[in-house]
Image: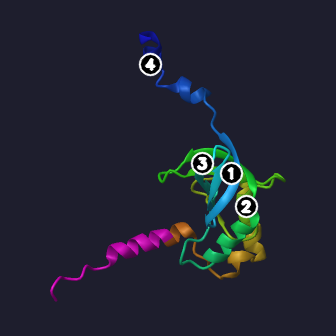
Amino acid sequence: MKIVLLVFFVLGGRYANDYSPKEITLYGKVVKIVDGDTYDILLNNNTTRRIRMEGIDAPEKKMPFYKVAKDHLGILCFGKMVRIMQSSTDRNGRSIAKTYLSNGSEIGLLMIEAGYAWHFKKYSSDLQLAKAEIKAKNNRVGLWVDENPVAPWDWRKNQSQHKQQIPVQGVGK
């Protein structure tokens, strides 16, 4: 046992990481749409898991196109059986995953093609998503009808900076 642990530490745990699967495949039914890039899935073991769709970023609450993006995601997958390919989890415990309908369509790509999400280039180098975003932008579909739509990551950054700049009111004035 000591030798096995020693080998593990000497190799830096590489054996466990290099030979473990990078993606986990899960199947289930979409039971809740949270927003345009997040939903809950009911797994076969009767538990739910929150899924953050990999490679896309959709408008946040209070942003233009938030509701239409959320509704469009619902039209695409609510109540349907899907296959997810989980690549990781985020700091909020959500599964980061590609989501596939029974016909093989990937939902994140469909959201970008419809113009209701951006390609999240900071976390994805997927050329298919990049091309779909360019096409949606050029065709001015969905949120691209706006002259200068604000990306969700810029909107979130602006919101956090705004919160930091709000002066605290004095007590008893």
Q: Nearer the viewer, mark 1 or mark 2?
A: 2
Q: Secondary structure at mark 3?
A: loop
Spot the residue most to the right: 103
Identify the image quadrant of the N terminus.
top left
Residue 158 image-quadrant placement: bottom left
Question: For the residue carrying disc 2, how many other residues have a C-alpha within 10 Å: few (<14), some (14-19), or many (20+)?
Answer: some
Label 4 packing within 10 angstroms: few (<14), some (14-19), many (20+): few
Circle 2: element type: loop
* Coordinates of residue 87 in the picture (x, y in percent): 62, 44
- Of residues 169 and 34, the one nearer the viewer is 34
Q: Nearer the viewer, residue 144 or 172?
A: 172
Say which mark, if any, is on residue 79.
2
Q: Is residue 37 magenta?
A: no
- Mark with earlier residue (2, 3): 3
In whole angstroms, how far apart are the C-alphas of marks 2 and 3?
15 Å
Q: Are marks 2 and 3 in contact (CB under 8 Å)?
A: no
Residue at 63% in and 76% down: 67
- Give the residues in magenta: 156-173
- Residue 24 position within the rendered picture, expressed as x and y whole percent measured from the top left: 65, 40
Residue annotated with mark 4 = 10
